[in-house]
Amino acid sequence: MESPIRLHWLDPRNPHQPFPPVHLAMRDPNGLLAIGGDLSTTRLLRAYRQGIFPWYNPDEPILWWCPDPRTVLHPSGLHVSRSLGKTVRRSDYALSFDRAFGEVLAACGGERAKSRGTWLGPDMRAAYGDLFRKGHAHSVEVWRDGRLIGGLYGVAIGRVFFGESMFSHATDASKLALYWLCRQLERWGFELIDCQVSSSHLLSLGAQEVPREQFLRQLAQATDAGALSPVWRFDDAPADPRHGPSP
């Protein structure tokens, strides 16, 4: 008889404690690997480098995941539909990096709070705020008439961007953020955007499901690549000051 799978408990007092091997992750729910620990910068960066990420509701203990398959997007592989192409070419918006990280975080949390499975609680927001202040997390903001209408945020290690969440308060605003992010990351030689788990929306934008082992091999190489400056700037995204802060 096959022995039952037991979750690995992490000590919240020891951020250097190793994660268990990812092949021990549960099949149902897919990818659940460990429970507990903390959201310190040390533990979070260690997790991301190993393809592990936190995802849990505010009233739960911290849950750590590494699903199989993994959903990834190559920056050069973003699918640009005809309608998105028209939106990109419009001149009524502006882009910035890292100008309103807290606002983006709050908007992403608010968007999720409307549905079951709210995960971006106060502890998570504080943890990613710390990552941002230390240069590891970044946000993309989309502005119109000085108002934040969309954006996304994630964590960067080496040449991998670990996408966490996005929001939109206007048609295609989050897609604009993703479009210009992909364009800039491609210029910088980024190899992967980790999208974590699949959805029809992500697949329609060009994301792909890959076996976990393949993802982990690519991740190991790409995260060892040299890091960029912690200060990110767009090369050529729209930045008309009439529509929002310049990047």
Image (cartoon, rainbow, N blue to C red):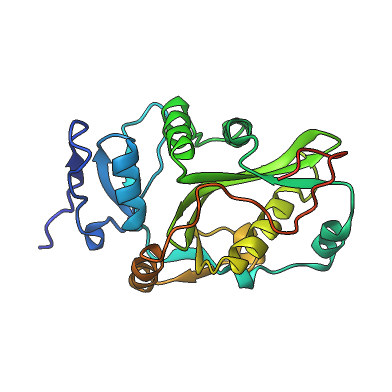
Image spot of residue 52 (x, y percent): 34, 53
Q: Is residue 98 left or right of residue 47?
A: right
The quadrant in which residue 206 appears is bottom right
Q: Is residue 95 above or below residue 214?
A: above
Image spot of residue 240 (x, y percent): 84, 45
**The N terminus is located in which quarter?**
bottom left
Q: How many marks?
A: 0
Picture residue at 34% right of the left edge, 48% below the top: 45
Q: Is residue 2 above or below residue 16?
A: below
Picture residue at 11% right of the left edge, 57% below the top: 3
Given residues 86 and 183, the one toward you in this image is 183
Q: Is residue 181 left or right of residue 165?
A: right
Residue 59 visible in rendering? yes
**The C terminus is located in which quarter?**
top right
Picture residue at 39% right of the left edge, 26% below the top: 59
Picture residue at 60% right of the left edge, 68% below the top: 186
Residue 168 visible in rendering? no
The quadrant in which residue 236 appears is bottom right
Image spot of residue 88 (x, y percent): 82, 58
Image spot of residue 223 (x, y percent): 38, 62
